Image: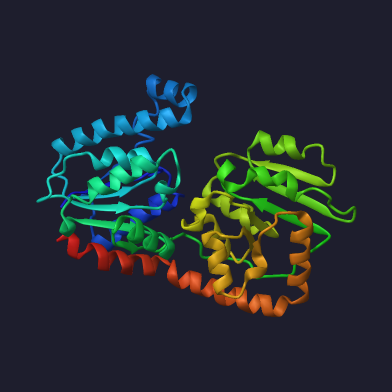
Amino acid sequence: MLFLFCQPSLKNKDTVDYLIRTLIIKTLGLKKNYLSFDSFQRNNNSKLYIFLANFTPRALFLFLNGLFTFFDLKKLYKKKAITHIFLDSYTIFDLFFFSVLNFNQNKTKLFVYLRIPYDQIILTKLFFYFSINKLKTYSKNNLIFLTDTLELKNHFKRKFNIECKIVPIPSKITNYKNLKKIDSKKIDILFPGKSRAEKGISLISNIFEDIPDDKKITFKFLDNNYIFDLLKKNKKIKPIMLKKNLSYQKYIESISNSDILILPYTHKTYKLRSSGIFIDAIKLNKFCFVSNNTWMSSLLKKNGLKIFVLKIWSFEEINKRIKYINENFNKIKKDYTNFRHNILLLNSEKKFKTTIRKLLINKSK
């Protein structure tokens, strides 16, 4: 057996991608019978790669990177006797070019991890339809589609008639702080993760308008000049820019040392797709406010925690919720603790290994 992992961030031990690979290796007992391929790290020292990354539009760079990935994987597949491939569809073009590779269906088993419903994005819809329908021509006995939410599983079944198996979202988190009331006069707020448009950066200025004079707000976010420029003239806020590429330890500390997290995600794909940051925040026992009509909001509502779901993003609304939480703290704490317990059970390393063993062991023989 020779297992090939096609995933991003495999050189960074602090990422969930690295953890997923590690857990699969341990579960299947692969030892040295595996190879790793990261389409964003194989050529990142070449002059051509650096030029494309810095001087071409993002969409064009991703397309060309996917094309280079196609040729590299084709060459690797011919050279090595690869029997199993685990593909994380990190970008639509990685998935697209992967789907047109000619694998030997008698000797290669594919595990395709679908985390984003690219069919809901206008610019990627056709690429996704082609990729899924192309992969569906592969032998059903040698192909498993994976995903990480029930919403995505149902969506892919309805739209593409494919059966996805749900895998947990593992993490290294073991320590956490106790829940406590929020100091409504002095609030430390974190906007975690990469500050991309789809995560609601357009709402940031609205959130911090009309802050009462008796409030002191610290707002932390990853290095983003747009957000900093929005807030630098607001004397009622202390904006703190964190490093763009935080270490895992610093990432965990940024969550643990905050009073609340805000996830004002706006992109419609978040109605179906998961958020690793949200899972990490819950595991770390931190209150997290999320947008309505997202996967996160559906989990919170099911567990009696709709107080953390916002339809309107404003400081006035957040302040109302904080007041309610403090006034009803014992009940909120009980419900939140039960919710966290369920999250831990469903997304533990043990649960991940058990799931992978059921899904992959038979396919790996």
* Residue 315, picture quadrant: bottom right
The residue most toward the right is 213
* 339 horizontally vs 353: left or right: right
What colouring style does the render use?
rainbow
Task: State how many labels appear.
Answer: 0
* 93 horizontally vs 334: left or right: left
Q: Give above or below for 316 relative to 92.
A: below
* 194 horizontally vs 308: left or right: left
* Residue 338, picture quadrant: bottom right
Residue at 18% across, 50% down: 138
Q: Is residue 199 visible?
A: yes
* Residue 328, picture quadrant: bottom right
Where does the image place residue 326, in percent across and percent down from the top left? 76, 72
Residue toward you, 298 or 276: 298
Residue at 16% across, 45% down: 82
Residue toward you, 109 or 243: 109
* 224 horizontally vs 143: left or right: right
The residue most toward the left is 106
Q: Is residue 38 visible?
A: no
Where does the image place residue 26, in percent across and percent down from the top left? 29, 60
Where does the image place residue 19, in percent across and percent down from the top left? 39, 54
Residue toward you, 121 or 309: 121
Q: Quadrant of the C terminus?
A: bottom left
Where does the image place residue 198, in percent across and percent down from the top left? 56, 45
